[in-house]
């Protein structure tokens, strides 16, 4: 499954909307960074990795999940 771009875009837009309402700029910078990291982690773990190759023991395939 490919990365879920649309979900990431919507979460970042929501985060921007939330941050624009903040009244304390200095406090909101840290909060924004923490929430952005959470969005990026969620985005990166939204995909699976498929591996195909060969070795001395023959061909192999596999599927993994990024955690």
Image (cartoon, rainbow, N blue to C red):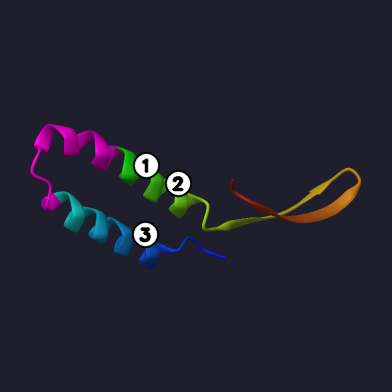
What is the CA distance from the residue labelled 2 to the residue labelled 1?
A: 6 Å
- Mark 2 closeness class: few <14, some 14–19, many ≥20 residues within 10 Å: some
User: Which comes sooner in the sequence, label 1 or label 3?
Assistant: 3
28 in the magenta segment: yes
Q: Which residues are magenta?
A: 20-33
> Disc 2 on helix, strand or loop?
helix
Q: Residue at x 11, y 52 (%)?
A: 21
x, y percentage for residue 63? 71, 56
> Disc 3 on helix, strand or loop?
helix
User: Which comes sooner in the sequence, label 2 or label 3?
Assistant: 3
Q: Are marks 2 and 1 in contact (CB under 8 Å)?
A: yes
> Which residue is identified by label 2?
41
x, y percentage for residue 45? 52, 52
> Which residue is identified by label 3?
8
> Which residue is identified by label 1?
37
Q: Residue at x 77, y 56 (%)?
A: 61
What is the CA distance from the residue labelled 2 to the residue labelled 3?
A: 10 Å
- Quarter where residue 32 is shown: top left
> Disc 1 on helix, strand or loop?
helix
- The secondary structure that dominates the magenta segment is helix
**Depth check, front residue: 37 or 30:** 30
Q: Residue at x 52, y 63 (%)?
A: 2
Mark seen at residue 15: none
4 in the magenta segment: no
**Depth check, front residue: 53 or 41:** 41
- In this picture, residue 27 sits left or right of residue 56: left
- Mark 3 closeness class: few <14, some 14–19, many ≥20 residues within 10 Å: some
> Which quadrant does the N terminus fall into?
bottom right
- Mark 1 closeness class: few <14, some 14–19, many ≥20 residues within 10 Å: few
């Amino acid at each position: 499954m490919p990365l879920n771009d649309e979900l990431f875009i919507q979460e970042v837009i929501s985060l921007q909307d939330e941050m624009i309402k903040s009244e304390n700029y200095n406090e909101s910078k840290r909060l924004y960074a923490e929430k952005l990291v959470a969005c990026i982690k969620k985005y990166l773990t939204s995909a699976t990795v498929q591996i195909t190759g060969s070795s001395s023991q023959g061909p192999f395939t596999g599927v993994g999940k990024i955690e």
